[in-house]
Amino acid sequence: MPAKGKGKAPPLPLEDARLRGGIRRKLKRWFAKARRPLPWRDGYHPYRVWVSEMMLQQTQVDTVLPYYHRWMERFPDVESVAKAPEEAVLKAWEGLGYYRRARYLHKAARQIVERHQGQVPSALEDLLALPGIGRYTAGAIRSIGHDLPAPLVDGNVGRVLGRVVALGHPPASPEGQKQLWAAAEALTPSRHPRGFNEGLMELGALVCQPRNPDCPRCPLRGHCRAHALGDPEAYPPPNLRKPRPERRGVLLLLQDHGQRLLLRRRPPGGLWAGLWEPPWYEACGPEGGPKFAEELLRKSLTRLGIGAPRQHPPRFMATLRHGLTHMEWVLDSYAAHLPRSQESPAPENPAPEIDPALDQDAVEFRWADPAQRAELPMSRLARKALALIDV
């Protein structure tokens, strides 16, 4: 028995054609029996593969499935995406997060219509020239959508290959990436690579998981250096994670007497670009809490031409927490109503009535009733806030 625990192993001789052939055959046979009946595998249309790969970035398959089906009902082909306004694309994506992916899909679809007659290209250089498509996504579209040779390395593939070769570097490190892509290039077959690449991805999702990998079920256990060393969970080493900082702010739910809510639309670049939300503001240092919320309400109403009634301060609703990849927002949410005696003016766009120091990130304002709010594309954070009043 090999000694349990992380150790060194001689390099896997991937230059050996017999070894490569054995790995490919075993993985393809396993995948043919174990593959899940996912909708983008029905016919392997390059457009459907592309959409699925964009949706699956940092998102689990079970989460993606209902969004994928709705997207395909709304946008059955590249042309339908290209012709749609951005707001409709963002609305169809709502809830998946990482909205830049949807904007990339939209921009890339227009380029595909203009330059490739509406057909998702197969050449790597053409795929890499499209917005939002990097080395992995290009390899996935070419090898899975077109069944043409191209290596790919994502989280699941990196874990499988990292264990097969007993990778000694974190997968996200430069040396780790170099070795993983070299292994993927060596192993990807020149003919019919679809089953092999999908097999790597499926093996990582179903068998070779981060914790408690099911080695007895793995078709590659006889070739796996990490398994031979007795501790597959030790490979590859974990990526170093930086602590996620916390940032605080105050969110205002300002309604008029007709239950319309004041919303702002974010600019086309940056966080949640183009999405609608109630105004919220980062609180720096000792700022925050009821006094900060009341001052923000007063300034906003003043800019709307309405005096803030002193006898009706903003009412605290809840503290919302929303984690992003690089930070976590903690927002104290307050609700307020316009006096019934006051009209709610229609904000101009951009709205000069709103203090630019408070809403420097907004490009448009509007009052929206519940039905209108349901149709506007919003982030999960905005929907969390609306849930406090839309009951």
Image: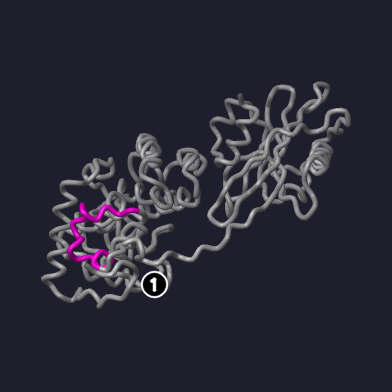
How many callouts does the rendering have?
A: 1
Looking at the image, can residue 138 be seen? Answer: yes
Binning the other alpha carbons within 10 Å of mark 1 as few (below 14), some (14 to 19) or many (20 upward) gives some
Looking at the image, can residue 303 be seen? Answer: no
Q: Relative to residue 19, is residue 143 drawn left or right? A: right
- Which quadrant, please, contains the C terminus? top right
Q: Which region is colored magenta?
A: 212-228
Residue furthest left as drawn: 18
Q: Amino acid under label 1? A: His
Position in image of residue 214 (x %, y %):
26, 52
Pick the residue in front: 273 or 108. Answer: 273
Residue appearing at x 41%, y 46% in the figure? 82
On screen, 238 above or below 47? below
Q: Which residue is mark 1?
A: 169
Residue appearing at x 43%, y 58% in the figure? 131
Position in image of residue 130 (x %, y %):
39, 59
Quadrant assignment, res 173: bottom left
- Which quadrant, please, contains the N terminus? bottom left
Residue appearing at x 54%, y 38% in the figure? 377
Residue appearing at x 44%, y 49% in the figure? 106
Q: Secondary structure at mark 1?
A: loop
Pick the residue in front: 146 or 380. Answer: 380
Residue furthest right as drawn: 310
Is 224 within the magenta?
A: yes
Pick the residue in front: 177 or 243. Answer: 243
Position in image of residue 269 (x %, y %):
58, 54
Q: Relative to residue 374, is residue 362 drawn left or right? A: right
Q: Relative to residue 17, is residue 239 drawn left or right? A: right
Position in image of residue 182 (x %, y %):
29, 72
